[in-house]
Amino acid sequence: MEQAMFAGGCFWCMVTPFEELPGIHGIVSGYAGGTVENPTYEQVKTGTTGHYEVVQITYDPAVFPYSRLLELFWPQIDPTDDGGQFQDRGTQYRTAVFYYNEEQRLAALASREQVAASGRFEGPVVTEILPAPRFYRAEEYHQDYHKKNPKHYKEDRGQSGRDTFIAKHWYK
């Protein structure tokens, strides 16, 4: 098993694209990259701790290669927005691909170049490719939020503008 970590704005919205796929063995919502140890959601949501909201994915690369994870990641985000994602604004909602080894780093850089060269976007791709920092698991109520609170999740996602953006820029 290996791990991958992605920041794509709200971590609730970053779980569903990866779940229930062969070779994916776990998806955990959490925080990474900040200056506070064991941060809480209340701290991270202020945007003052330096953390990103992230998902950490445990996967079997023999069944589901890292390149496929990247192919699923990019169409979930606006890679040109460095101020957050959709309705979620602030540094905690920035996008990033965090790598655990050189193979992941090179694959992430190549995939970002492909996205930038795709002609889908007017502005530059600003999603960072960074070494994986320490991961902190988010509070339990954030885990599988879409299953625990489907009505609120659906309403929040619908209002965010994420799906409209995805349809316009990724699946036209």
Image: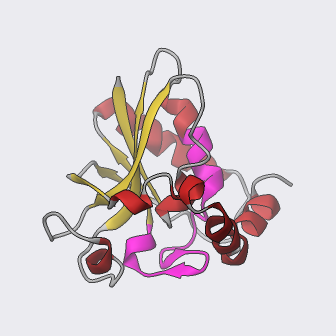
Which is nearer the eye, 85 or 27?
27
> Which quarter of the picture shows residue 17?
top right
**Residue 125 placement, left or right of 96:** right
* x then y, percent, for residue 54: 40, 57
Which is nearer the eye, 153 or 69?
153
Is residue 82 found inside the magenta-colored segment of the image? yes
Residue drawn at point x = 71 percent, y = 74 percent: 161
Quadrant where the image shows the N terminus: top left
Residue drawn at point x = 43 percent, y = 36 percent: 26
Q: Give the answer, above or below, for where 29 lies relative to 47.
A: above
**Residue 118 placement, left or right of 78:** right
What span is colored magenta in the figure? 70-94
Is residue 93 found inside the magenta-colored segment of the image? yes
* x then y, percent, for residue 151: 67, 67
> Which quarter of the picture shows residue 44?
bottom left
* x then y, percent, for residue 105: 36, 39
Q: Residue furthest left?
A: 37
* x then y, percent, for residue 12: 52, 60
> Which quarter of the picture shows residue 60?
top left
